[in-house]
Image: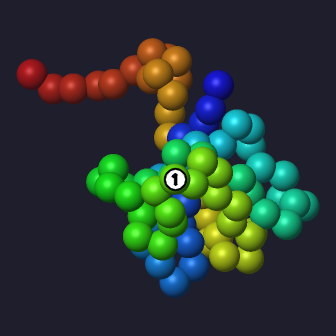
């Protein structure tokens, strides 16, 4: 099961991608698949045919994980009538 993350690249716009597991902070790079802009469009500096993208940790400010469909079932949302 892949984890969808928002990747905040240093000096650039945030992009979205998937990872297979939480990355090891001791690694030199993080591997992402299905990388795209937040609006779903292709990222201009990544070739459309690329299946995996490796970003070095020093270029990543931070990662945000998005809830999966399984996680959303566990989240209770409150609303007002």
Using the rendered image of the protein, determine whether residue 57 is visible from the camera's viewpoint: yes
Q: How crowded is mark 1: few (under 14 residues within 10 Å), some or many (20 or more)?
A: few
Q: Is mark 1 on a helix, strand or loop?
A: loop
In this rendering, the answer to whether 21 lies above or below 35 is above
Q: Quadrant of residue 29?
A: bottom right
Residue at 15% x, 26% y: name it.
Answer: 80
In this rendering, the answer to whether 30 lies above or below 1 is below
Quarter of the image with the C terminus in it: top left
Residue at 33% x, 50% y: name it.
Answer: 40
Residue at 74% x, 43% y: name it.
Answer: 22
58 sits to left or right of 61? right
Quarter of the image with the N terminus in it: top right
43 or 30: nearer the eye? Answer: 43
Using the rendered image of the protein, determine whether residue 65 is visible from the camera's viewpoint: no
Residue ID for mark 1:
49
Q: In which quarter of the image is residue 63?
A: bottom right
Query: Residue 47 location, x and y as percent?
Result: 50, 63
Query: Residue 77 location, x and y as percent?
Result: 33, 25
In this rendering, the answer to whether 1 lies above or below 63 is above
Query: Residue 58 location, x and y as percent?
Result: 73, 76
């Amino acid at each position: 099961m892949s984890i969808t993350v928002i990747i905040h690249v240093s000096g650039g716009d945030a992009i979205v991608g998937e990872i297979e597991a939480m990355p090891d902070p001791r690694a030199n790079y993080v591997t992402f698949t299905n990388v795209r802009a937040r609006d779903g469009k292709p990222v201009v500096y990544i070739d459309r045919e690329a299946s995996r993208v490796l970003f070095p940790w020093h270029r990543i400010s931070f990662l945000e994980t998005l809830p999966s469909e399984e996680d959303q079932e566990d989240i209770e949302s409150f609303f007002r009538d």
